[in-house]
Amino acid sequence: MTGWEEYTIIKDDPQFLRKIKRCSDVELSYYTGLLGIGGFAAYVGISNVAAPKQGQVVYISAAAGGVGQLAGQFSTTQ
């Protein structure tokens, strides 16, 4: 995509970019984890794909990563 930088000039079609609507009570850093694509992937993986039932054991083999860590948290709320 663009790499690690402060400013970027996007010359291609910016369809893959999305502007974050800034809420006063939500930190911008939350959009890189829980409210970002990692949080979305973890939520869909647990709620739609795995869909654990009450009393079942959930094993997440990659729970050390960002998505796996959130999936583990989401699985405790099911």
Image (cartoon, helix red, strand yellow):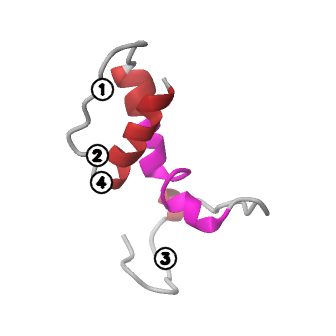
The residue mark sitting in front, 3 or 2, is 2
Q: Which mark is residue 63?
A: 2
Q: Position of residue 56 (x, y in %)?
A: 33, 15
State if disc 2 and disc 4 touch (CB < 8 Å). yes
> Mark 3 is on which residue type?
Ile
Q: Which residue is mark 1?
A: 58
Label 1 crowd (10 A; few <14 / some 14-19 / many >=20): some
User: At 39% from the left edge and 75% from the top edge, which residue is drawn?
Assistant: 2
- Compare residues 1 and 44 and report the one nearer the observer: 44
Look at the image and tell me in which quarter the N terminus lies. bottom left
Q: Which residue is mark 3?
A: 10
Label 2 crowd (10 A; few <14 / some 14-19 / many >=20): some
User: At 56% from the left edge and 66% from the top edge, which residue is drawn?
Assistant: 29
Q: Main secondary structure of the magenta part?
A: helix
Label 3 crowd (10 A; few <14 / some 14-19 / many >=20): few
Q: Which residue is mark 4?
A: 65
Please report whichever mark, 1 or 3, sits nearer to the chain's N-terminal start. 3
